[in-house]
Amino acid sequence: MSITVVGSVAFDAVKTPFGERERMLGGAATYFALAASFFDQVHVVGRVGDDFGEEDLGVVAARGTDVTDVERVPDGKTFFWAGEYGWDLNSRETLDTQLNVFQDFQPQLSPASRECDALFLANIQPELQLSVLEQCGETKFVAMDSMNFWIDSARDALIEVIRRVDCVVLNDAELRQLTGRPSIIAAAREVLGLGPSAVVAKQGEYGSALVTEDQFFSLPAFPLEKVIDPTGAGDTFAGGFVGFLARQLDRPLTEPVLRQAMAYGTALASFTVEEFGTERLQRMNGGEIDSRVEELRRITQFEHVAVPLETS
Amino acid sequence: MSITVVGSVAFDAVKTPFGERERMLGGAATYFALAASFFDQVHVVGRVGDDFGEEDLGVVAARGTDVTDVERVPDGKTFFWAGEYGWDLNSRETLDTQLNVFQDFQPQLSPASRECDALFLANIQPELQLSVLEQCGETKFVAMDSMNFWIDSARDALIEVIRRVDCVVLNDAELRQLTGRPSIIAAAREVLGLGPSAVVAKQGEYGSALVTEDQFFSLPAFPLEKVIDPTGAGDTFAGGFVGFLARQLDRPLTEPVLRQAMAYGTALASFTVEEFGTERLQRMNGGEIDSRVEELRRITQFEHVAVPLETS
């Protein structure tokens, strides 16, 4: 099995109450690939400038990830984002966005990237997501992300992408914006009506929820006493989630499998936020991930012994 | 066993995107009592005006609740609060607050109210919470609530209350404000350091978390396609939580018991928000509550079968 991700590979400048980084490796595809590479062969499709060094590419290529389709543009500059987080890390202000070489990104997938079993369309222009879908005809499982900007400005194309994927991964605000429904479960059910079989609602510090045709599942974020930098948490989650699922594609994706995938995504994301950028993600091992998944199980279980209740 | 609650009994005017009520029965003690009365004998200690009718009192007195200590002030007016919720119900604006007879509330507990096994100090002035604590010398379990206003203006008294109770129930923003810590788990651990053995963080649409000395538990809100009015959800939760615990006070409160209490509080709160004010709560039965607790268990369970992970 193999996984392809199409999305941004970037440099970020980030300031949080706990420190800052002037230029760190980032981008949705980077976080996704680092997480998914624990599970399977990953192919990254993206575009960088010649300011993107060999050691940067080396980080993305960890654990055997194929970076052949990361196009390097001579005399080009890599996508740059700068942002600052508020004191409790729940608010974020974008200070600068320079699309640079990403502006003219036209994903061209090599045969190896096309022949993936699982595909993640990270947050890029919906028209480009459609072009990738057309290149990957045989993919067994496709998940996608998007953002408020595309919901506003490219709604029709975005809806067309949603119709063609298996799983939509959006945050609560995006699900509400997309559907105009204040209830997340109602919003997710409306998205399911377009075609996907699963919707994942990302809920930041509160974790995530999974809505399928006849089930609902909710999982908290892994509890941490200290969060340093939330950048990339959502894409790391997606990498763990899709990565886990990619291994299970020889049989139908059942609810227990989807739930366990959510737990792996959540565990992986918890490492990302403990340090800046990909710093923690770069030196993780499988045992650490498994023990956080097990801890997630422990902190969400309870017994229900029905008690007699007064109803007079 | 019996439970005493000291707090507001009020009239509310509420506007949500789904309708409005110009004057409905409300107040923290009202919601708490309605929920806790499913579990045990409840005594309500509060103060109302002579505009508070027999039928209003009859609602509070449901399922045998003792309202002897609800003082009715001749020529007085009942505490009145007016508020309006934003479109996704996550923001709330207070339009009017008239303390009326509640301004001079000096809780005087009858022997029956004092001899309770469990006590809930709803959100009132911390000095009054201390006076109640002094009246209830033998109470086995005491939980408390508070609000941003008291954290700001009566911090020392509030800390003194916290030192003397078993359980603190606050929302995330209040825990952060109280401790200055952005991490909820770190904030809760700091509160535990003052004396309580449990901290419950209320998280609105995302449910709640329980922090004890050596454990953490997170429970989502019950998933609803339609929420009509969130007013009273937190106090209903507290009523179910404390109500369940009140029945277990003949043995030490273990983590499994606390977790199940969280589930009962969560199930009860989910009924409150489905209609305005206490409307739904008034016509609930025990079977409905139990089936939502069971559903909460179903939507939070997952299996963890460790998978081999690449760590090269």
Image (cartoon, coloured by chain):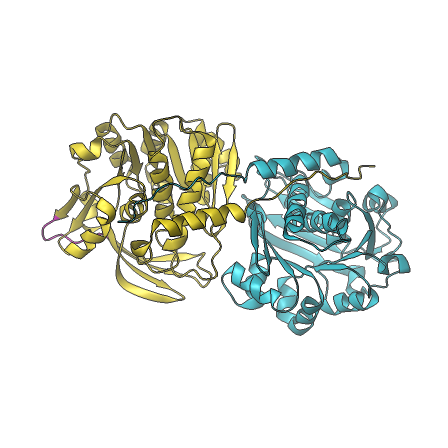
Chain colours: A cyan, B yellow
Residue B202: give x, y in percent of width and height: 44, 44
- Magenta residues: mostly which secondary structure? loop
Identity of the residue furthest to the left in this view: B74
Expressed as whole percent of the image width and height from the top left, the position of residue B288 reads 39, 52
Q: Is residue B277 left or right of residue A74?
A: left
Residue A26 in view? no
B58 vs B206, left or right, is left
**A26 vs B296, nearest the viewer:** B296
- On the rendered structure, is B250 left or right of A2? left
Q: Nearer the viewer, residue A186 or B93?
A: A186
Q: Is residue B60 above or below residue A305?
A: below
Task: Residue at 54% x, 43% y: name it.
Answer: A87
Residue under the image location 63 percent in, 39 percent down: A228
Is residue A230 found left or right of B160 in the rendered image? right
Q: Residue furthest bottom?
A: A156
Using the rendered image of the protein, determine whether residue A33 is visible from the camera's viewpoint. Answer: yes
Residue B67: say if magenta: no
Along the viewing direction, whichever of B257 and B191 lies nearer the viewer? B257
Magenta residues, as a range? B73-79
Residue B306 found in image quarter: top right
In this view, B196 is above or below B238: above
Counting from the top left corner in percent of width and height, residue A192 is at 61, 65
The percent coordinates of residue A78 (x first, y second) are 80, 55
